[in-house]
Image: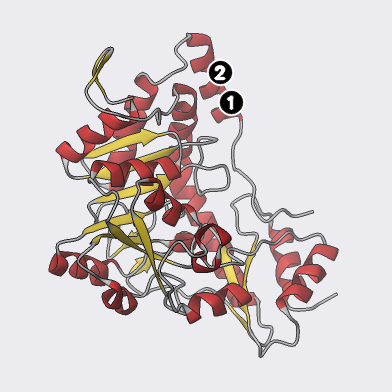
Amino acid sequence: MIPVARPCVGQEEADAAARVIFSGMLASGQEVIHFEKEFADFCGTPHAVATSNGTTALHVAMAALGIGPGDEVIVPSFTFIASATSVSMCGASPVLADIEEKTYCIDPEKVLELISPQTKAIIGVHLFGQPCDIRALSDICTDHALHFIEDCAQAHGAQYRGRAVGSYGTCGCFSFYPTKNMTCGEGGMVTSTNPEFINRIRLLINHGQKEKYLHTELGYNFRLTDIAAAIGRVQLRKLPKMNQTRQENADFFTKKIVRRGIIPPFVRQDSTHVFHQYAIRVTDQADITRDELVSDLNRKGIGTAIHYPIPIHKQPVYEGKIQPCGCPVSEKISREILSLPVYPGLTLEQRDSITQAVNGCE
């Protein structure tokens, strides 16, 4: 079976974790400090703070910005649900916007229609490794005095107009979940150019502790461990090559998959897509339905996934709790989308098998 995703970890990561284990310093320490510095340098930002996962990165970033009850944050409806639930965890209300059909990213024109006096921020998700329209969203935020939060959970190393994602907004929030382009096992990171904002995050992730056992406000336990940071440092060194291989795999699929009605991922001309997912669309013009293709690929030993089958505005957790919204493109894409394996560990033979199977060859 070719899985839809597989962490690319090995002996170097195991050795790094073992080194920390035998050091006796397992909680946040020097490994975390080094990881933060190295990740900030990679993103081209002066500051970064490591957190326990990508959701806590989003949550604490909004908490540090003072977003709370009575506030609204505009979020794409077609994304992983943490982009919205992190808003709710702050007591604020997610306002769901539709997406661009080509990129699957939030549509700036739809965002403009949703801004209200209660709007405090816009979350632009760089979905599947593709940067959203950063310039348009940044301009909107500047014009309306809003925070622009980059959700970079799926876009480590992606670039927009020659700069890394995570370096444009008020902050960038990353995830290091096992299937991401790089992993710590679990972990997150917040990047920013604002030192006061970063210092507030450091306070909040450590129980609101200004000095040892001196707690000046309510905080959280959102710290990253040294074990995870050591793994992350190894992964960060490998990330450019792993992203390059993802791009090569994606380019291969885009050239070789020729079945009618199947649309490959679109790539912005001004961006570098790092293909966290290779997400095709199985449209009504195809000679096979998406569910039939999933079954056919599974029969041939090829794993797939649907990212995401239910837009956030249709999720039961938000039923009756958020303002009604019309997101027809999100609903359309959720019916057509299908992720194929694209991770760096694919062999040439596996790539051939995937393309032949998608094309309907036995």
- Image height of 102 relative to 14, above or below: below
Q: Kindly identify which residue carries mark 1.
A: 14
Res. 91 mark = none
Front in this rendered view, residue 283 or 355: 283
Q: Quadrant of residue 73?
A: bottom left
Q: Residue furthest front?
A: 320
Image spot of residue 141 (x, y percent): 20, 65
- Image height of 317 relative to 113, above or below: above
Q: Quadrant of the C terminus?
A: bottom right
Q: Secondary structure at mark 2?
A: helix
Front in this rendered view, residue 6 or 314: 314
Image spot of residue 321 (x, y percent): 45, 61
Image spot of residue 63 (x, y percent): 29, 43
Image spot of residue 161 (x, y percent): 27, 65
Is 289 on the left-hand or right-hand side of 141?
right
Q: Residue at x 44, y 45 (%)?
A: 55
Q: Secondary structure at mark 1?
A: helix
Dot 2: few (<14), some (14–19), or many (≥20) neighbours within 10 Å? some
* Residues at circles 2 and 1 in contact by the CB criterion of under 8 Å: yes
Q: Residue at x 50, y 49 (%)?
A: 181
Q: Kindly identify which residue carries mark 2.
A: 18
Dot 1: few (<14), some (14–19), or many (≥20) neighbours within 10 Å? some
Front in this rendered view, residue 189 or 249: 189
3D distance between C-alphas at marks 2 and 1 = 6 Å
Q: Residue at x 28, y 48 (%)?
A: 68
Badge 1 amino acid: Ala
Is 103 on the left-hand or right-hand side of 134?
right
Numbered disc total: 2
Badge 2 amino acid: Ala
- Image height of 10 relative to 161, above or below: above
Q: Quadrant of residue 160?
A: bottom left
Q: Identify the coloring.
A: secondary structure
